[in-house]
Amino acid sequence: MASFKNNNGSLNQRPFLIGNLRGIQGHINKTNAALNRVLCQATLAIKNGDYDPAIAALKPLAESGNTRAEAAMGYIFFNGLGVDQNYSSASIWYFKAAVKGNADAQYHLGLMNLNGFGVPKSGSLAMKWLRRASDQGYVAAKVEIARMYDTGNGIQQGIALAVRFYRDAAEHGDATAQHTLGQIYDGDKGGPSVPKEAIKWHRMAAYNGHLQSQLKLAPLYEHGTGVPADLVRAYVLYGLAADQGSAEAKSRQSTIRDRMTPHQRDLAAQIGAEYRMVMTAGTGDVP
């Protein structure tokens, strides 16, 4: 039998302490797993419109200081889900979670400060919370910061900083940021035109599901304006735009089809299917 005594004959408590710590950690893990189940079930209930059981589960957790539950209660009050819409209550719950580092709460609290919903309107406070969320990789916060610099909303306008944050969000797959970078490099916002960069970002946005970039690129490929003429690519882009309800794109796709060879039509169908698969998967990768 193993001895638990030190060399001086006193009892060595280390094995007992290790055993107790492992037991405590196992209990914590089980508790966290159970808590995660409750939070996931409550989130699903909100998505399904079952607000009463969601609130019943979330409110006591939020009142006990659970950060995710606090953020969820902020969302509930902001949107009036099963409760009267109350921006002030939403801001309180979001603040509780935001100061603990919850990026979602920081983002929404930033938007509330930017627009004066339930809190005093403040560009500096909006930037403070959005930057904290952005620093944690929250892509929507990066886009909002870029918009603030782009438009001068709440802060001094600065296109260089706007581009920096748009690019950061775009490289994380955000279609709106990709499209906006395309516009910037088109020269639409007063800067110099950089066609190759514009095409690059519009293309990423288009195949990431952005309708305006699809409609921007399709005629360029159809007519060979600034890019090599490519009926297959034009047909695919018009098709993706038509999927989103563009009657103009649907008409142009039909017209192009009459000019395509059977091989081009088959190739366009294959490429279009691949792009739709990627867009459905939400990976943002361009085949």
Image: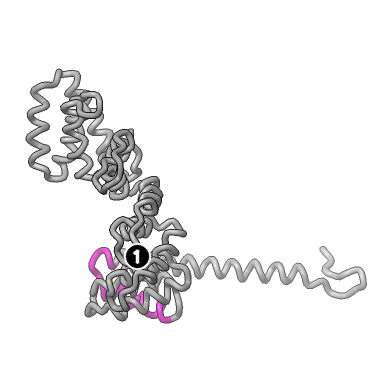
Q: Tell me the element at label 1.
A: loop
In this rendering, the answer to whether 267 lies above or below 70 is: above
Residue where numbered disc 1 is placed: 155
Q: Amino acid at mark 1?
A: Ile
Q: Colour mode?
A: one colour
Chief secondary structure of the magenta portion: helix
Q: Quadrant of the C terminus?
A: top left
Image x and y of residue 271, in percent: 25, 29
227 inside magenta stretch = no
In this rendering, the answer to whether 245 lies above or below 46 is: above
Tell me the residue at 39%/80% (across/down): 60
Q: Which portion, as a residue range, is magenta?
A: 46-63
Compared across the picture, whether 272 is left or right of 251 comes to right
Compared across the picture, whether 246 is left or right of 40 comes to left
Image x and y of residue 144, in percent: 33, 59
Categorize mark 1 by other alpha carbons within 10 Å: few (<14), some (14-19), many (20+): some
62 inside magenta stretch = yes
Compared across the picture, whether 43 is left or right of 83 comes to right
